[in-house]
């Protein structure tokens, strides 16, 4: 997940004449941060690492930390999207003799990966409408959200949701490719 902006807010007049507070469409960039996150589906706990870049070495370093926290006899299954640092990690995986396995979600099927629920919560509860003047402010806001999430973490409960025909068709097509 990449996040980055500072936005001013102000008052605008709508077509109906009402004056409302809104975010201005222009924003100032102060650089970007990259968030790597792992969800323990059994506990709901999230482990994160915020980096300045989205490099494969950063991703592998993050996973080294995740794996260090697990018992050595435990198999680890990592569900990933097709983000470029997630690919071409065969040499790194070979160090674990099959103990760590990657599983990739198809394109347009991010709903299969439960960490996306955490990203959605972070977006809605912390980032939407927020303005960050520095990368440190953004980093602190993310860390505070994760800390609060982990204090009351529990496994996510899957619920059936309505899937529109086009979404299902796209997912099936991507699974077949």
Image (tube, helix red, strand yellow):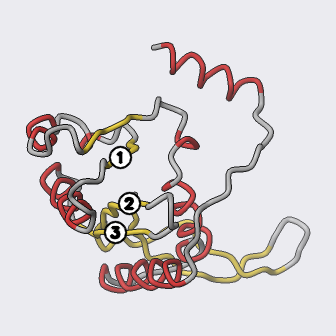
The tag on residue 38 is 2
Q: Which x, y percent locates residue 115?
A: 48, 56
- Picture coordinates of residue 67, whole percent (x, y): 23, 60
Q: Secondary structure at mark 3?
A: strand
Locate residue 79 relative to residue 50 in the image: left or right: right
Q: CA distance from mark 2 to mark 3?
A: 6 Å
Query: Which residue does the image show at 31% across and 79% down from the upper left?
Result: 135
Numbered mark located on residue 131 in the image: none
Instruction: Where is residue 78? Give x, y as percent.
Output: 35, 46
Q: Nearer the viewer, mark 3 or mark 1?
A: 1
Residue at horizontal 14 percent and vertical 45 percent from the top: 96
Q: Are marks 2 and 3 in contact (CB under 8 Å)?
A: yes
- Give the class, few, some or many, for how many residues have Cα within 10 Å of label 2's Cα (few <14, many ≥20): many
Residue at image location 77% in from the left, 43% down from the top: 161
Q: Position of residue 174 (x, y in %)?
A: 51, 20
Q: Name the image quarter holding residue 160.
A: top right
For the residue pair 8 and 135, the one nearer the viewer reads as 135
Please tell me whether residue 83 is drawn above or below residue 108 in the rendered image: below
In space, the residues marked 2 and 1 are separated at their CA atoms by 8 Å
**Are the residues flagged by discs 2 and 1 in contact, CB closer than 8 Å?**
yes
What residue did someone put label 3 on? 48
Q: Residues within 10 Å of mark 1 (few under 14, many from 20)?
A: some
Pick whichever, 12 or 51, lies toward us. Answer: 51
Q: Quadrant of residue 84?
A: top left
Asked if residue 32 is positioned above or below residue 102 in the image, the reply reads below
Q: Secondary structure at mark 1?
A: strand
Sequence-first tag of 2 and 1 = 2
Label 1 near label 3: C-beta < 8 Å? no
Q: Quadrant of the C terminus?
A: top left
Q: Which residue is disc 1 drawn over?
A: 78
Q: Nearer the viewer, residue 13 or 110?
A: 110
């Amino acid at each position: 997940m990449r996040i980055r902006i500072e936005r001013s807010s102000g008052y605008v007049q709508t077509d109906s004449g009402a004056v409302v507070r809104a975010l201005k469409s222009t924003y100032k960039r102060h650089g970007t941060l990259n968030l790597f996150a792992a969800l323990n589906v059994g506990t709901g706990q999230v482990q994160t690492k915020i980096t300045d870049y989205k490099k494969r070495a950063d991703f592998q370093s993050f996973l080294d930390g995740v794996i260090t926290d697990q018992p050595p006899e435990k198999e680890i299954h990592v569900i990933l999207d097709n983000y470029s640092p997630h690919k071409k990690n065969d040499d790194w995986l070979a160090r674990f003799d099959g103990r760590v396995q990657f599983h990739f979600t198809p394109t347009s099927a991010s709903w299969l990966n439960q960490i996306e629920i955490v990203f959605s919560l972070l977006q809605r509860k912390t980032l939407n409408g927020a303005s960050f003047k520095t990368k440190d402010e953004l980093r602190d806001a993310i860390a505070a959200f994760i800390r609060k999430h982990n204090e009351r973490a529990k496994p996510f409960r899957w619920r059936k949701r309505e899937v529109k025909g086009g979404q299902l068709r796209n997912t099936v097509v991507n699974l077949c490719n």
